[in-house]
Image: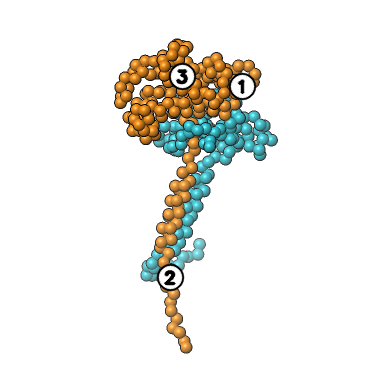
Chain colours: A orange, B cyan
Amino acid sequence: MAKKKKKMPGLNTSSTADISFMLLIFFLVTTSMDTDMGLARRLPQPPDPDQEDAQIDVKERNVLNVRLNAAGMLMVNHDVMDIKELRARAKEFVKNENNLSSLPEKHVKEIDLLGPCFITDKHVISVQTDRGTPYNIYFEVQNELVAAYNELREELSRQKFGRSYANLTDEQKVAIRAYYPQKISEAEPKNYGGN
Amino acid sequence: MAGFKKKEKREMPEMNTSSLPDLIFTILFFFMIVTTMREVTLKVKFVVPQGTELEKLEKKSAVSFIYVGPPTDQLRAQMGSGTRIQLNDRYAEPREVMDFVAQERQGMTNQAEQTISIKADQHTQMGIITDIKEVLRKSWALRINYSASRRN
């Protein structure tokens, strides 16, 4: 019973390369996918050395002074307050719905898509910190201020365009941003005593 | 320098492709290692603050990182526990940030979009952050990003 010896056909491995290529691509994509998150801010331009005092006089009613001391306590204009209340205060300040004389002055400004608007484009939120202020308190304040602007923009976007701000076209976003320009200025830190 | 034997003329054998997957696997591992290697060895430890209004850090090629925090546990014995700034793989002073920014900018194709991501420990004092920000302003690196994690 001598069997005829059959030659084993070789396994076709040509597709293994494709499989590993797929893996390669998968890993390439996933490794770059975990993007870092953060609060994006823009710093003001460096002061011009030729210009002696670039101090722009801003009316008192147009400024919301947010001060943080070394203990992480928050003072807005002349009131000590909790960080949780800051967002509502900032919204009230930027919006000035009833055109109160204690809140920023309003001007009529022509904005594309929205027409003439009565807005508080001269307002400034000034954040002043102490050198000893904890970073997370400062971050929290920045976060709340950005949140205030984002909420205002969202409200306006729903009211004018009936859609969420995130779903607007680029031109519409520009219009909304012109209505509520983000004006957060950062003053030099001061030592309010106590290191 | 013994003589090399002259080879006889042979029929060309079909190329063996069985090692091709191995080759590609090697590339795969290379990329896997390289992508994790790009992150510098951290010499400071930090827990970033938490926020809600975060944006994703896009265009990674234009992002440079500045780490701020106390030295890691292994290095604490030598370096003390004061807050330090880390640029690339070493500790630095705030004024060195300017050179760092310029150096990083040189290697970028989209220099106008250069973003500095500040990864600072939440218990850092603002003094050092302000110093960094002042230097960044002077070196015209105006786009910054305070690194944070999402709060649930």
Q: Callout 1 environment at 10 Å: few (<14), some (14 to 19), or many (20+)?
A: many
Q: Disc 2 to disc 1, how far (Cα)?
A: 75 Å
Categorize mark 3 by other alpha carbons within 10 Å: few (<14), some (14-19), many (20+). many
Picture coordinates of residue A72, whole percent (x, y): 60, 23
Mark 1: secondary structure:
loop
Q: Are marks 3 and 1 in contact (CB under 8 Å)?
A: no
Residue B88: % across, % down? 54, 36
State the CA–CA distance, disc 2 to disc 3: 78 Å
Marking on residue A93 = 3
Please name the residue that numbered disc 2 is placed on: A10
Vertical relation: A180 (above or below) B88 = above
Q: Could you tell me which secondary element the residue under label 2 belongs to? A: loop
Q: Give the number of the mark in front: 2 or 1.
A: 1
Residue A190, horizontal then vertical, whole percent: 57, 17
Q: Is residue B68 visible?
A: no
Which numbered disc flags the more N-terminal residue, 2 or 1?
A: 2
Which quadrant would residue A103 be assigned to in this image?
A: top left
Q: Amino acid at mark 3?
A: Phe
Viewer can see residue B36: yes
Q: Are marks 2 and 3 in contact (CB under 8 Å)?
A: no
Q: Report the residue marked by disc 1.
A: A70
- The residue type indicated by label 1 comes to Ala
Which one is earlier in the sequence, the residue at label 2 or at label 3?
Answer: 2
